[in-house]
Amino acid sequence: MSRSGRLRDGEAQRKPRYLCVSKFLWLVAVIVVAMMVTLAAQIRPTPQPPPRRTPPPPKTAPAPKGGTSEPDDRGQPGAAPQQPAPATERAPQAPAPQVSADPNVNAGAALYKKNGCYECHVNDGQGGPQGPRLGPNPIPMPRFVAYVRNPSGDMPPFTAKVITDDDLSKIYAFLQSRPTPPPVKDIPLLAP
Amino acid sequence: MGESKKPEPKVLQRREFLQKGALAGAAAIVGSSAELTAQSSPAVSPAPAGPTTPIMTAAGEAIGPGEVQVLRDNQRSGSDFMVDVLKALGFEYVAANPGSSFRGLHESIINYGGNKNPELITCMHEESAVAMAHGYYKAEGKPMLVAAHGTVGLQHASMALYNAWCDRVPVYMVIGNYNDAAVRRPAEWYHGVQDAALMVRDFTKWDDTPWSLTHFAESAVRAYNVAVTPPMAPVVLVLDGILQEEGVDSNKLPAIPKAPIPAPPQGDSASVEQAARMLVAAESPVLVVDRLARTPNGMKLLVELAELVGAGVVDQTSRMNFPTRHPLNQTLRAAAAIGEADLVVGLEVADFWASVNVLRDQLHRSTEPRTKAGAKMITITTGDLYVRANYQDFRRLQDVDLAIAADGEATLPSLIEAVKRLATADRKRVFQERAGKLAELNRVAADRARVNASFAWNASPVSTARLAAEMWAQLKTEDWSLVSSYYTSDLGGWPRRLWNFDKPYQWLGHAGGGGIGYGAPASVGGALANKKHGRLSVAIQTDGDLMYAPGVLWTAAHHRIPLLSVMNNNRAYHMELMHVQRMCNARNRSVDRGAIGSQITDPNIDYAKLAASMGVYAEGPIENPADLGPALKRAIAVVKRGEPAVVDVVTQVR
């Protein structure tokens, strides 16, 4: 190796050719095994509840005006005046597949992550200290898009250059598909 | 340099070795300064001129260095006396990463002092040592001693000192320094400094460099009193290496001052009376509290005041101020409570402006008030007694109707008495009706929190709400103490929403200055304080924070400090990730690269293996929420045996 770390001329040729072939085969084998493991992981059952039925149509709900419905982490009010979180209405109890039959939901899940929505609204759209809950019953699509484009609180704006309406519709489908939790009274750990 | 016969080889005893070490190189230890010699000259035996030791000081020339110097039976080292003083101040522990500039004190602590009161706690980083002392104070209510190398040790410690200063927590720090340049060994030149405490003077309350043991005794007691008198803050004493190491006749030791700790400042009677009138007259008062409860009595007093006037309380939780399930606790609806108020009373609120105003973090930053028009405001805080120039922790100046520069907790008794005097029967009825309405709002908010917690209940990675609920199921029958802080954890506030905090030691507040790396060592410090009380210490430990100085896990294992650390492992510096995304949005750029530089993945860190490598019981990573309860049970059994345990839980981001 030269001091720069590059191979000197002819250095590669000094290696036996069968070794190169063997490495190639090993590489192929490793890739195949990795793909199989990845596929197996994707189809592995998860501790999620059983899949839910087709999500209900969006219900009328107040548009979020920014800020958070919860106090921030220091007990101070949220960063913007308190606004009602998007209303969510309970969908029927239903299984929640990790991989949906609806390609829009799967695409929306990826876009929800890619565009950083999860950072404030958390992995499943359930909301957190920095962003209100979005699913499973998000606000109507037109108001959803309008708010994303021009938020009134601390939420950063997403222009059409950053995320298209089509991508937003897929994210919307993902949010609609979020599993509805069991009633609180049926969760002993949440008893008062 | 003269020539003479070299001494016979001999096996060095430890003290001889230490003193040989001090003699080695170009430095002559004897008679480092006129002042020191004047105080400690009886300890120095005139000895034959050393053949290989250069004489570099006037005192040294006068006396001449000895080949081997040990203390006579009637002598004690300067640092022995320092230990006497430190014992008199009541320190239980001294957290330290070893350093040669305080080797004299180190030896005195472990041998002369018997390594008890204070007991030396071996730390793997000076920042960890100070943060441990920070957490210890908040659980125990008294300072822990920290010893550190001068210069390099203090540089390591500085971030943690800044946290403690911002949090107004007394940390008592001693550092070593060889002040006399003529006696420094070669390595001590890198550590030697003219003004050792200068670099932290902007964020410590007081420091001093004693030049004699009398000076040390007075400064040590003064430093303690300064540190624990509100507004509290860290102090630093610079201990000269020679002052530590030289001997002094036992019958010539100075006395240890018995100066009492000053009483904290209370609000003046006229201002307190005015505040009471405003409280009694208000229709919808709210008490906003932050660093109010200095002692366990602080929570009792706040409960009494709130119940007396039927006022809601918004707890910003820098201290354990108010029970989370008290009907008047309005923290879960803080913005609404402040927005409805006609009187906002800030009690030791670090950032009162931000409590009553909103700053919108967009490309163009705008502000607007949270309060309704005409709302009156009162502040009672020691923040008005202590403002420094450089570091900007004093925040924006809020226009208030009455500002009382005093300690909040110390002022509450007189405020309560004044309210009792002024409250008429009619007003008491109003207070009662108001309290009933607030209790109902509190109940609704708590119910809403439980519903919110149910979303993503069975998700993997584990939701933070589920993690908090699983922990509470294990803790609620124990005498527990959550020793971790917001900056490292609190799972987006879920413990405060789901757990019943009603004891002063169940929550220790925040880091203060926002310096990450505080959480893990502060938790160990809090757990150390809780140990003798038999409390079950539990920390919600974030991944990024732990990786600043994970060696503190070894400290916990080595000293058998029982602590359950449950990892809130979201594999990111998630808050920073959100900030970067905000910048992407503001610049109208794609946000899909926003995670670069903020995620802790590829490879994922195996915290269970990390902990196990340091002798800590560990489980994980846990991704299935159904596995959590049993894992927590097993880990708690270990902690109850007196050891630390780590349960690594891969969690959702918030």
Image: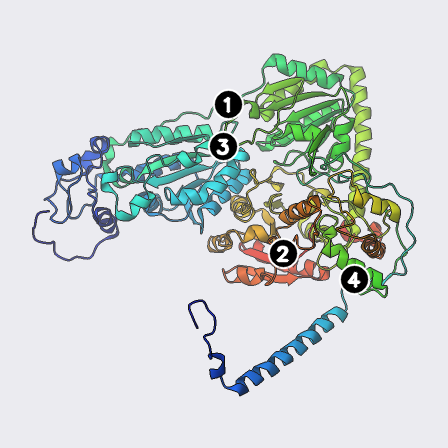
Same-subunit check for callouts 3 and 4: no
Residue type highlighted by circle 3: Ala
Marks 4, 2 in one chain: no
Q: Earlier in the sequence, mark 2 or mark 1?
A: 1
Residue B195 at x, y = what percent?
Answer: 35, 34
- Give the residue type that dot 4 points to: Gln
**Disc 4 and disc 1: Cα gap in Å?**
58 Å
Label 1 chain ID: B
3D distance between C-alphas at marks 2 and 1 = 46 Å
Secondary structure under tag 2 reads loop
- Looking at the rendered image, the disc whose residue lies closer to the viewer, 4 or 1, is 4
Q: Are marks 3 and 4 in contact (CB under 8 Å)?
A: no
Question: Disc 3 vs disc 2: which is toward the camera?
Answer: 2
- Residue type, numbered disc 1: Ala
| Residue ID for mark 3 | B233
- The residue drawn where x is 68% and y is 37% is A75
Q: Which residue is mark 1?
A: B263
